[in-house]
Amino acid sequence: MARIRVLVVDDHRIFAESLAAALAAEQDVDVAAAGSGPAALRCLERAAAEGRRFDVLLVDADLGTAADGVGPPLPVPAELPYGGANGTAHSGIQGGRHGGTHVGAHGGPHGGVHGGPHGGAHGGPARAVNGRAADGISLVGAVRSAQPGVRTVVLAERDDPRRAAAALQAGASGWVAKDCSLVRLLAVIRGVLREETHLPPALLTGVLRELTAARKHRTESERLVESLTPREREVLRCMVAGLGRKAVAERLFLSPHTVRTHMQNVLGKLGVHSTLAAVALARRAGVGPVDLAGEIVERGGQLA
C-alpha cells in the first residue's frame, strides 16, 4: 500500500496536534506538523534531502495571526512529528456543515475550471517576504515554487471567495472548512493526489467570479504593457526589481535624465501616477523583476 505523507501547518497547537493524531490513525497516512511557515519550509527541505518528500500540505489560511488577526502567534514547537497507524483517533475538527465539490480539468458532474488545479490568472496576490512565508496563502506560493510536486490544501475557519481564489492562484489544490468532517478531509487529501481541485459548493460561484475578474484585469494589464517599447519594458522590469533612477541608469548605460523620461513614458502609457501603481500593474501582467545577478544590458544593444 502506497503511503501518503502529510504535513500539517497551523500555529494553534491543540488543533495541529489533534488533526495530526487523527490523520495518523489512518493505515496509509504518515503525518508531521509545523507551527509556522518557515518551520514548514525547513521541514519540507529536510524531507526532500532525505528522499522522503511530503505529498500533501495542510495549511491554516490564517497562519501567523491570532484569532482576532492582530495578536502574536501561539508558541508552537517548530515541528511536531507523529507516527503512522498508532496515533489516537480523536480530532480537533468536527463533523461539518460543508460537503465538497471538486473542480478541475476533468469537469464532469461537478463542473470544471480549465487550466488545472491552480485556477485562473497566474501570479496572484500571495507573496513571501524576505524568502519567508508570511501567511498561509503566501506559504502556498512558496511551496509551489520550491517543491511543485507537493499538493497544498488550505484549511479555513470561514468562507471567503476572494481568499479562496487567491489560494488557487497561488497554487493550492483545495480550500476546506476547518469544521468539516475527518472523512471529508481525507477524501480531499486523496483527491488532490489525483489532480483534483476541491472547493466547498457554497464557494464555487464566488471563486469562479473572482478568478474571471482576475483574468480580465490581467488581460487589460497585459495589453497596456504590450504598448511599451522594448526599452520601456526593460525600465519597467528594473522598477519591479525596486531599482531607483540612478541604479537603472547605471545598469542600462543611460543618463538619469533619459531614465526619467522613460519612467514618465511608462507611467503615462500604463495610465498610472506612481511607481508603486506601475509595479502592481506589471505584476498583474506577469512582468517579473530584472535579474539583478544576471548580465546587464551592454552599451549599444538592440533595445530601442
Image (cartoon, grey):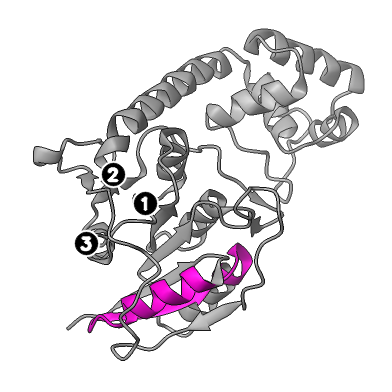
Which residue position is annotated with label 3?
187
Residue range of the region highlighted in magenta in the rendering: 14-40
The percent position of residue 261, horizontal first and vertical second, equals 82, 13
Dots 2 and 1: beta carbons under 8 Å? yes
284 versus 9 height, above or below: above
Q: Residue at x 22, y 84 (%)?
A: 27
Marks 3/1: CA distance?
13 Å
Q: Which mark is residue 200?
A: 2
Query: In front here: 140 or 256?
Result: 140
- Mark 3 secondary-structure assignment: helix
**Can you tell which quarter of the image residue 224 is in?**
top right
As for residue 26 lying within the magenta part, the answer is yes
Task: Indicate left or right for 183 with 43 as reference.
Answer: left
Secondary element at tag 1:
strand
Does residue 36 sit above or below 281 in this rendering?
A: below
The residue that label 1 is drawn on is: 177
- Alpha carbon separation for disc pair 2 and 1: 8 Å
Q: Which residue is drawn at 66% across and 38% down?
A: 289
